Image (spheres, grey):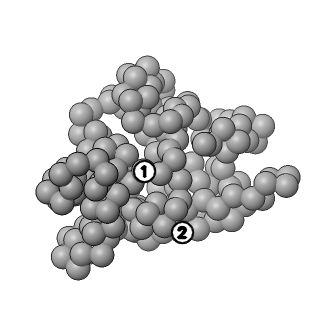
Amino acid sequence: SSIVATLAQNDSIEISAQSGTTKVCQRLDIKIGQASYSLIDTPGFQRPTRVLAWLQAQASSAEKRADAVGKFLSDEECQRQFPDEIQLLTPIMNGAAIIYVVDGSRPYGQEYEAEMEILRWTGQASLALINPIENEKHVDEWQQALGQYFNVVQVFNAMQWDFEQRLPVLQSFP
């Protein structure tokens, strides 16, 4: 949410220091010069390992992966068990590109790979942003890992960058 609020220059978006507070998608339309963008703030992953296991059981090969994500979204049991993931993946499967945001002040961990793999299964264009919230201690390890999953990886300091530093992030999106 902090990245969406920063890119949209919208102070009305609720931002919490605690992750997992976004429960429903919120769409923000912004215009910068002649360019228009729609940003969708979604809940984050809550059970990515379980979701990935479900998806892997549905698709035996790469060409079936996007269809498996579609089945996940329409499955009533998945809708009950994984409401955050349903909210997160629905706009992506409807054509939205992905901006995946991580905290560069926290260490990279293998637990994030299930999230990144699920996003890769959607087949959508993707950008990863490393937001060094407290420090830049783990930025290098994040860059190494994210580069294996995303088309573009950039460091983006949501709290300190001015508008001129934010604009290239939107312009560099695939």
Q: In the image, what residue type sits under mark 1?
A: Gly
Q: In the image, what residue type sits under mark 2?
A: Gln
Taking the view exactly as shown, the residue that stands out farthest to the bottom is: 76
**Horizontal and vertical percent position of residue 132:** 50, 32
Which is more N-terminal, label 2 or label 1?
A: 2
Asked if residue 60 can be seen in this view, the reply is: yes
Residue density around tag 2, few if under 14, some if 14–19, many if 20 or more, within 10 Å: some
**Horizontal and vertical percent position of residue 84:** 33, 65
Per the image, label 2 sits on a secondary structure element best described as strand
**Horizontal and vertical percent position of residue 106:** 37, 32
Residue 7, label in figure: none
Residue 12: image quadrant is bottom right
Check the image and report above or below for 33 versus 139: below
Residue density around tag 1, few if under 14, some if 14–19, many if 20 or more, within 10 Å: some
Q: Which residue is mark 1?
A: 123
Q: Along the line of sight, which residue is nearer the eye, 147 or 130?
A: 147
| Tally of numbered tags | 2
Q: Which residue is mark 2?
A: 26
Q: Along the line of sight, which residue is nearer the eye, 42 or 16?
A: 42
Asked if residue 18 can be seen in this view, the reply is: no
